[in-house]
Image (cartoon, coloured by chain):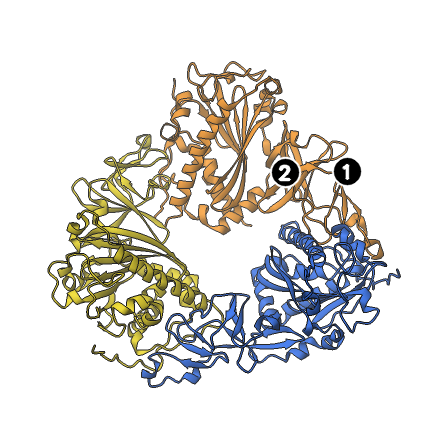
Chain colours: A yellow, B orange, C blue
Amino acid sequence: MIVKPRDVMPPDARTLPARFYVDHACFMREVEALFRQMWVCAGRLEEIERPGQFVLRDLAGDSIIVTRTATGDVRAFHNVCRHRGTRLCTDAAGTFAGSIQCPYHAWTYGLDGRLLGAPHMDEVPHFRKEDYPLHAVNADTWDGHVFLNVAQSPAPLRSQLADLPDKFRAWRMQDLRLGHRIVYDVRANWKLIIQNYNECLHCPNLHPALNKLSHYLSGENEPLNATYMGGRMDLRPGVDTLSMDGSCPRERLPGLSTEDRRRVYYYAIFPNMLLSLHPDYMMVHTLWPIAPDRTINVCEWHFQPSELAKPGFNAADAIDFWDLTNRQDWHVCELSQAGIASRAYTPGPYSNREDLLFAFDRMIVALHERPV
Amino acid sequence: MIVKPRDVMPPDARTLPARFYVDHACFMREVEALFRQMWVCAGRLEEIERPGQFVLRDLAGDSIIVTRTATGDVRAFHNVCRHRGTRLCTDAAGTFAGSIQCPYHAWTYGLDGRLLGAPHMDEVPHFRKEDYPLHAVNADTWDGHVFLNVAQSPAPLRSQLADLPDKFRAWRMQDLRLGHRIVYDVRANWKLIIQNYNECLHCPNLHPALNKLSHYLSGENEPLNATYMGGRMDLRPGVDTLSMDGSCPRERLPGLSTEDRRRVYYYAIFPNMLLSLHPDYMMVHTLWPIAPDRTINVCEWHFQPSELAKPGFNAADAIDFWDLTNRQDWHVCELSQAGIASRAYTPGPYSNREDLLFAFDRMIVALHERPV
Amino acid sequence: MIVKPRDVMPPDARTLPARFYVDHACFMREVEALFRQMWVCAGRLEEIERPGQFVLRDLAGDSIIVTRTATGDVRAFHNVCRHRGTRLCTDAAGTFAGSIQCPYHAWTYGLDGRLLGAPHMDEVPHFRKEDYPLHAVNADTWDGHVFLNVAQSPAPLRSQLADLPDKFRAWRMQDLRLGHRIVYDVRANWKLIIQNYNECLHCPNLHPALNKLSHYLSGENEPLNATYMGGRMDLRPGVDTLSMDGSCPRERLPGLSTEDRRRVYYYAIFPNMLLSLHPDYMMVHTLWPIAPDRTINVCEWHFQPSELAKPGFNAADAIDFWDLTNRQDWHVCELSQAGIASRAYTPGPYSNREDLLFAFDRMIVALHERPV
């Protein structure tokens, strides 16, 4: 294995001060600047395949309905009636029968958000239905991933994704389908999860199983991009994918190059998506910040439909491997959160193998220094 | 059925901004201005029939002992020893044996609040027992209802009740006795419960059972009074009271007019009493605000003693009907609380059928604009 | 029994205003000025007898490792890795195998806190291991008791203890060993526990069992010392120690004078140790403030090893007696906390028997008036 040395860290390359992880105002600033201004990954198109099918998402306290119109458009709305503010819908997923009706006074909206009916409001002379559509949330998709943006007039998703669609076109993510989902409730700041994801210096100590399949010094990182960061690692000789024993009982994804069949790509797409592309499956984490010290972390494993359709399909080898690794990671993130919250914490020095973390931290600091 | 049209709402008749429902300072302002300045309904005289019999009430964090003296006077005291502040009493109800003794150092008070004994304080030359009576809370009654007022020198209960004693004299509420009590813990602002109570526009959608017994457009509201608001609704032909099937297995209250035997009266008596008078029973809700988004809601059903005394007395028809309706109401209040707390909420337009709510909101806004 | 009268309280001898018990800023001020500046009692040397043996302590949110080096020195460290702040250790007690390793990136520290290993940090040219020892916490001992101090350069433990080592030398506390431990979670301010401990005026009413063994007016208090306060009480004739029936099935501690074999000494050593010395055993409470209204209270009973070694050793007579008394005390402290938190609470008058409390309160007030 050829280990490429990393650039040497500057002398001031230290972890962030504690307030970035424990202070509520800092947390809200990040929620505003990142989770309310950027596109956040909110799941997969297959969850809303048919018109009226919907899922709810909770984005930093705001409940959002994601659904599909009769003509197949993906649409998202705040889950708030325009009459008296009532939540319209409480089921986490389901199918609307052609329209969305408030349980309180029966105000009724189309799947496109238009107000269709408002009992007794016609007695109010100045009332016009067209003034009270559901509050819309921007929605768009990328290769089967659904993204939401609650800002008023955001830049298009394409500009946030930059060159990622080109970079990962060969994986044909739009063809993959959900095999398994685990929701983790992590008592740590969302940034600790992203930082944990973007270095493998911890792998020999924390993840002996992973390190046996993929050497922690293998692979290469890209320099930090404005909206994402990531890199790739190599599978060790004789290892075919990341699974309990390193073997791969599934067909590889079609169209991957010989090199990419021996690599795993790890990309953190800001602010909330961790995309892990394996030779034969895709793992996606989406992060949902709840509090400075709490993040809901939804992990999904996606496979080729041809594999899912096989009798006795069983991906426990990949799911168990990552569930084990995930739990090790979230536990150590929680230990970091607890330690950083201590009055004794002081920023510590980064090694050269934590280059992406240092770059990410600079971006976070710049965001906090930006005038509001 | 003749439906009287309501006055047309002005163009700016919108629901309150979110802060009135979610902000802690707003909540405390309302607690101070309403729950600590006005008389609050705190139960029924029958709960403290005998001298020394007591109940505890928790009014916005203050524990209050309500009891009766040897001479039959209703008295209320803060549940705080004048020595070192200890809670005197922790039982929710019971009977004092002639006096109230602190469990800590045995300071002992009469049922009128006077300090009777304070061990070893006679060794302190400047100490005088008469300086340390229990902190009194004003107490008064109306037709069997007990009211408390924690203000120093409040206007009399009569002035707050205005013409209500005259209006509801015929129901002889003082003769009724408790049949059942349910305590609801509602995750919504106290005002949402009052607003929900004062319009029936939501009845066809939310309460099909209620709407079958009493048409939602029937009846009439009074204009908002300074200290209460309410109106009446009519029972549909063939319906005798609000019960699971609309029949009335009980004698009607004596002394009601022919018209009032066909009506239900709904009065919200500020700040915390919802009085619902049926031809054959009285339902009373008392509201106890805990937090901007939480209210304890005590619901009681009261009947004639002659009915309660009948062998096999069973009022499940009335209790189950309202428990079902209550739960529908509290659920939708909680949905409103959740939606209003969303960043996407904006005040929405009131219909002409929500006239009392708009008037109530104006009163609340005026209260917040008042100099402290 | 000769009862010595106490000095007469001045007319303004009243309990503290409520903010000292309920306000978070007041609480933090006391944590800073007392629990972070003074030596706090943190257990017993016997818990860390062998090199590498450790216990964790949580001091006002900071996790602290207390351990012993190969040369037998007691050392304490913040439980925070100098790399990325991770908690090093989560077990409440155990034994390190010669060094302390971070679970995240395997930074490894000696039992003296020195950084021994930091993988890949040698690639960073400006990095020096000696710059990153564990953050040390001062540790010292007194007759078997371990004390910690998180301040930078505190005065020595000896100066805080003043004449206590002389005063209690005869009890040979260093020879005693743990017989039993109970951890209480008390919903009351830490000061209420100290105040409760320092007067026995409440004993006849709250502790009839204790009062039967030791008359509440017996004994004598010392005037308040800068860092401790306390006094002694006498056992009643025929009573040999504080136990369920007043008999003493154990040998008395050797070296006690005839007088001290008939007394119990109660000393509150600020900020967190309550030392109760009986003729035949030692009881120690350590207080760990969690919030203005919550304190963890660790109670331990220590006996002579010769007694502990006796077949069928059973000290239930002493343990049950104090567990009963403890629970009565904590309950009434919780009642005081609840009452003081009420808006109706006003400071009340102290009796002459509460002289130590008044002196303690003056010290607390002075601390709050001190410039920060």
Q: Nearer the viewer, residue A342 or C143?
A: C143
Query: What chain is tagged by disc 2?
Result: B
Dot 1: chain letter: B
> In terms of image quadrants, where is residue C201?
bottom right
Quadrant where the N terminus of chain C sits is bottom right
Tag 1 secondary structure: loop
Is the residue marked by circle 1 packed among few (<14), some (14-19), or many (20+) residues within 10 Å? some
Q: In front: C26, or C260? A: C260
Q: Residue furthest right?
A: C2
Judged left or right of residue B140, residue C95 is left
Both marks 1 and 2 on one chain: yes
Cα–Cα gap, marks 1 and 2: 22 Å
Counting every numbered tag in the picture gives 2
| Foreground pick, B358 / B42 | B42
Residue at position x 27%, y 42% from top?
A133
- Left or right: residue B171 compared with residue A63: right
Residue B98: mark = 1
Position of residue A340 measured from the top left corner of the image (x, y, whole percent)? 44, 68
Q: Nearer the viewer, mark 1 or mark 2?
A: 1
**Label 1 or label 2, whichever comes before in sequence order:** 1
| Percent coordinates x, y for residue B142 in the rendering | 63, 29
Whether residue A152 sits left or right of residue A333 in the image: it is: left
Residue holding disc 2: B148
Q: Amino acid at mark 1?
A: Gly
Relative depth, front residue between A363 and C225:
C225
What label does residue B268 carry, if any? none
